[in-house]
Image (cartoon, rainbow, N blue to C red):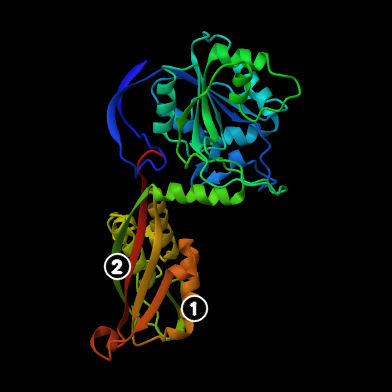
């Protein structure tokens, strides 16, 4: 048993929106069985739904991690399909879990296999049974269910039915919805109760959940009002709903950096050269001078990205005194900055670069430049903008002594918030 202060939501429909009360509650110790043995190929023939990726991890992993957050958890068993071992290994990478249990032909067979694997439990210990396809189960609902088990031998999360119900093939009036509840998981049972219910299950009867089994044994099931967000992923659109809910729990922060660079033309060059501007070769009678390939546009962009993530500047990462960078393709510098953005857990939102020069003319190469920069940064071209301007004959660019570039880059950091 564990006494904790926690947030318990009586309404439980929208945890973040309802009135909450803080109370001292007692959450009993418990074991959990997560049923993930279904084929689940309805919306993807190659990957069962419990192994589909929701944002950054699998449906199953969300379900597992929801229970791992509770310190009164004593053991966790996942029941899987014998054909899904490779999916399972990938889904639980980095988690320290007990060996999986192989499922059976029907859901009730899978649960029974898991119960048999828990044979060391005492009859009054609490076992929760949860469908892996409900990844949005939240800690407060699990806690509420466990608290109910202080006074009951069987309990389930459930939500009142609010829609009008009719049989599609009937002329009858609507089904009376008063008193109707939609049953969710997890469901909680005393180990002795649920094990006996499975042992005595009526042969040939189809049980879609475990409350049906214990009711057949005469054990009443207490309903605990759950959250609508704990829906079962069944159709493909359910994945989109789940992603929207998870995204709403992400806190995003945008950061911006700027870059500026200048390279002069090499007056000693006489022939037509191909100078590099933003990764694209542009014929011009003078080359740009520099230790690397002197790509002034990519240097400004690199600095802008490094600025956005607080990583100094291009000179710190690639000192011009280092012979290793002699004549280096500046795409390498920009790729390094891109990699650092990813390592920091951020994503590039957009970049914008302005090339400032009288010559060469940039216009004919603008589309090629956008494409190349997008390619280097591994982002879509709509996130890249390239502009060019002159200085009306003024200053060093006006005297055609060199090319300047300025750039701005925005990146987005996402962090998780709340109980998801
Ligand atoms: Mg430079």
- Name the residue rendered at 48%, 13% in the picture: 125
Quadrant (top left, top right, bottom left, bottom right) of the N terminus: top left
Q: Quadrant of residue 277?
A: bottom left
Q: Nearer the viewer, residue 7 or 357?
A: 7
Reading the image, the residue beneath label 2 is: 259
Q: Is residue 381 left or right of residue 46?
A: left
Question: Residue 12: where, in percent of width, then height?
Answer: 40, 37
As helix, strand or loop, the secondary structure at mark 1 comes to: helix
Q: Nearer the viewer, residue 372 or 63?
A: 63
Question: Residue 307: where, in percent of width, then height?
Answer: 29, 60
What is the number of callouts on the image?
2
Q: Is residue 48 left or right of residue 61?
A: right
Q: Nearer the viewer, residue 99 or 293?
A: 99
Question: Residue 239: where, in percent of width, then height?
Answer: 55, 48
Q: Is residue 178 left or right of residue 217?
A: left
Q: Quadrant of residue 217?
A: top right
Question: Residue 252: where, in percent of width, then height?
Answer: 35, 53
- Relative to 281, residue 4 above or below: above
- Name the residue rendered at 47%, 36% in the picture: 137
Kindly check if marks 2 and 1 are in contact, taking CB atoms under 8 A apart as contact. no
* Figure quadrant, ligand 1: bottom left
Q: Residues within 10 Å of mark 2 (few under 14, many from 20)?
A: many
Q: Earlier in the sequence, mark 2 or mark 1?
A: 2
Q: Which mark is residue 367?
A: 1
Q: Quadrant of residue 148?
A: top left
Q: Nearer the viewer, residue 204 or 84?
A: 204
- Relative to 338, residue 92 above or below: above
Quadrant (top left, top right, bottom left, bottom right) of the C terminus: top left
């Amino acid at each position: 048993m564990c006494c904790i202060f926690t947030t318990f939501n009586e309404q439980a429909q929208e945890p973040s929106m309802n009135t909450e009360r803080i109370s001292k509650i007692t959450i009993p110790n418990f074991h959990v069985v997560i049923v993930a043995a279904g084929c689940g190929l309805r919306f993807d023939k190659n990957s069962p739904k419990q192994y589909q990726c929701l944002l950054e991890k699998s449906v199953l992993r969300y379900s597992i991690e929801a229970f791992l957050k509770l310190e009164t958890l004593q053991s966790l068993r996942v029941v899987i399909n014998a054909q899904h071992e490779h999916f399972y290994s990938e889904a639980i990478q980095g988690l320290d879990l007990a060996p999986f249990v192989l499922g059976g032909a029907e859901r009730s067979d899978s649960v029974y296999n898991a119960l048999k694997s828990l044979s060391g439990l005492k009859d009054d210990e609490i076992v929760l049974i949860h469908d892996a396809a409900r990844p949005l189960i939240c800690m407060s609902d699990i806690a509420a269910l466990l608290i109910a088990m202080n006074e009951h031998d069987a309990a389930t999360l459930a939500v009142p039915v609010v829609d009008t119900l009719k049989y599609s093939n009937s002329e009858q009036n609507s089904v009376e919805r008063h008193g109707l509840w939609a049953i969710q998981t997890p469901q909680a049972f005393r180990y002795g109760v649920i094990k006996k219910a499975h042992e005595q299950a009526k042969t040939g009867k189809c049980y879609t959940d475990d409350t049906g089994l214990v009711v057949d044994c005469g054990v009443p099931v207490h309903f605990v009002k759950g959250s609508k967000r704990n829906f079962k992923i069944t159709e493909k659109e359910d994945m989109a709903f789940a992603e929207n809910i998870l995204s709403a729990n992400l806190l995003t922060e945008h950061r911006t950096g700027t870059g500026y660079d200048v390279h002069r033309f090499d007056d000693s060059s006489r022939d037509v050269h191909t100078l590099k501007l933003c990764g694209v070769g542009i014929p011009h009678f003078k080359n740009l001078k520099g230790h690397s390939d002197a790509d002034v546009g990519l240097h400004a962009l690199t600095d802008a990205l490094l600025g956005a993530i607080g990583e100094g500047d291009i000179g710190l990462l690639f000192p011009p005194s280092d012979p290793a960078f002699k004549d280096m393709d500046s795409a390498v510098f920009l790729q390094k900055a891109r990699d650092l953005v990813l390592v920091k857990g951020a994503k590039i939102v957009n970049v914008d670069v302005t090339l400032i020069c009288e010559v060469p003319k940039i216009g004919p190469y603008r589309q090629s430049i956008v494409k190349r920069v997008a390619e280097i940064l591994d982002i879509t071209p709509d996130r890249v903008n390239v502009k060019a301007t002159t200085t009306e004959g003024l200053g060093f660019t006006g005297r055609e002594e060199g090319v300047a570039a300025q750039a701005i880059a925005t990146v987005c950091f996402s962090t998780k918030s709340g109980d998801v």
